[in-house]
Amino acid sequence: MREVDLAVVGAGPAGLTAAIEGAKRGYSTVVLDMNPRPGGQLIKQIHKFFGSREHRAGTRGIEIADTLFYEAASAGVEVIVEAEVYAIHDSTLEVVVQTFAEDSLILPSEEATTSRSRPLSIAARRIVLATGGAENALSFAGWTLPGVMGAGAAQTMINLWRVLPGERILMVGAGNVGLIVSYQLMQAGGEVVAVIEATPRIGGYGVHAAKIRRAGIPILTSHTIVSASGESRVERAVIAKVDASWEIVPGSEQELEVDTICIAVGLYPNARLASLAGCELHYFPGLGGWIPVHNSRMETTVSGIYVAGDLSGVEEASTALEEGRLAGICAAASLGKERAGDHDEIKAIEGRLLGLRSGPFCQHRQDAKQELIGIGEAQCPQQ
Amino acid sequence: MRVVHHPILGNLPEVQQVRIWVDGKEIAARKGEPIAAAIAAAGIKIHRHTTKREEPRGIFCGIGQCTDCVMVVNGVPNVRTCITPVTEGMTVETQHGAGRGGR
Ligand SMILES: Cc1cc2nc3c(=O)[nH]c(=O)nc-3n(C[C@H](O)[C@H](O)[C@H](O)COP(=O)(O)OP(=O)(O)OC[C@H]3O[C@@H](n4cnc5c(N)ncnc54)[C@H](O)[C@@H]3O)c2cc1C
Ligand code: FES
């Protein structure tokens, strides 16, 4: 069994920053990610980020991911990809490393074509879970047909792998993700037929909506998807208007010829592993769903297990970077070597998080986080 | 369809080609890409058929979370094709049910 001081699950912005803080303080640190490329959601973001300069606004997500990965590697963090953590018990992470690659560092080459997985157990003195979020599904007639996919899946396909999953696309959801991905699908050569939104208002930022409108794509508010149909794959969709009580307005149905339907109706925290590890969860609709209860040091109800990023409330890359840092510093400090500057750094991070969670769009997140931390302070282990 | 020209990402960079076999048909893939990307580029949308009703399924999440995209790879069933990179000579088959014993 391998032994490390700090094990981090997830190589997104939260996981990488947490790991950097651990390694910078001289602790042996390993990051595990089930995807073949580190960076989490950032690796598919080719738009310039909003926010402040401090949070690398104006930089494309994919560039932030590369910088973070480089920073982590130079700090001495070991990042293992294609490594899925499937259980945590008694401070031990159970990992399965899966690959078919002959030149993989993990599998001896003679095994590579026949065997694809190798178990790995890692005993860690501290664990940071940064497993991110996953896209919500939406059920309607035909929603399981090939061609119905998460907007994030389509985004990964076009921006990371450079494959257009379909040619005529219906986007369901006009939040930032729906708007940004619609625009990026066009940049990749796809035709977005319409963006529909069940509420009467566009949820995403005005700048993103304006770009879509300028391209001549209709954004239909108070519209929902009724069905998808086709022979073994999506060939058409039926949409309709909804009234104030979310009922379909009879006679308002429209048929659209599309081969792809992208669902952008929010993300939920990917809390499965945290739950398996015994962390207590609490339901916060404003933060995406079930969230591991944590205190102000990001420690959960299981002593030694910390959380950060979208897992501890679906927010943004900027908050994930800050929370990751916070979790990393606190986890490292609890190992014994509290550094002189730690206290000030924690205060500074808390200040920046407060800033990121203020304003009309974000205040509800601050309120929910405050309530979550309140529960955490009472339930989580004391320092 | 490959995204060859892109206003922000530029032209598709040249990479080493890898050959994979999908249900017996040869497909050219790009080294490093996941199986799901290679078969989507070849126009294939169905990855598997469900156990009871044999309904078709394709990719849904693209990041290894939902298992809708599993196929039989080099004889191994239930491989998530969206997070498994291609390798030279790999065989990929549409999965039926749990993928064992042909059903
Ligand atoms: C379309 C879109 C646009 C966005 N635009 C912006 C923006 O402009 N500005 C902004 O600030 N934010 C933006 N965001 C949000 C931002 O990308 C996320 O909030 C951020 O990536 C969350 O970081 P994270 O580290 O918590 O999780 P993620 O980035 O989701 O990373 C989690 C990682 O954990 C891994 N993982 C999960 N479970 C396991 C397991 N069991 N074992 C091993 N590995 C595991 C996953 O593979 C993944 O790599 C956008 C998001 C989307 C979808
Ligand atoms: S598409 Fe969800 S696991 Fe592959």
Image: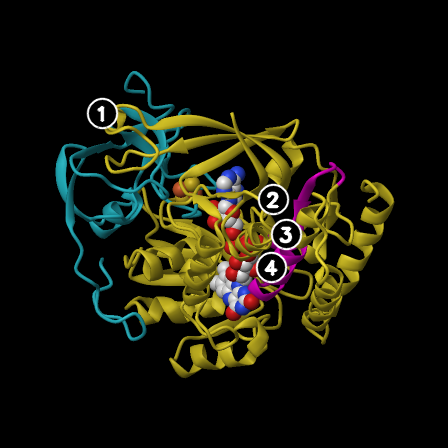
**Gap between marks 4 and 3 measured at Cα:** 12 Å
The quadrant of the picture occupied by the C terminus of chain B is: top left
Q: Which mark is residue A341?
A: none
Q: Which residue is mark 4?
A: A320
Quadrant assignment, res A320: bottom right
Both marks 4 and 3 on one chain? yes
> Circle 4 — which element?
helix
Q: Earlier in the sequence, mark 4 or mark 3?
A: 4
Badge 1 sits on which subunit?
A
Q: Which mark is residue A129?
A: 2
Residue appearing at x 44%, y 47% in the figure: B61
Q: Is residue A258 magenta?
A: no
Cα–Cα gap, marks 3 and 1:
38 Å
Mark 3 or 1, nearer chain start: 1
Ligand 1 lies under 8 Å from the Cβ of mark 3: no
Give percent across and percent down for residue A121: 51, 27
Q: In the displayed image of the protein, which residue is found farthest to the top?
A: B101
Q: Amino acid at mark 3?
A: Gly
Looking at mark 1, is its residue's CB closer than 8 Å to ligand 1?
Answer: no
- Disc 3 crowd, CA 10 A, few/some/many (<14, 14-19, 20+): many
Boundaries of the magenta span: A301-326
- Residue pointed to by mark 3: A328
Q: Which quarter of the rendering shows the N terminus of chain B?
A: bottom left
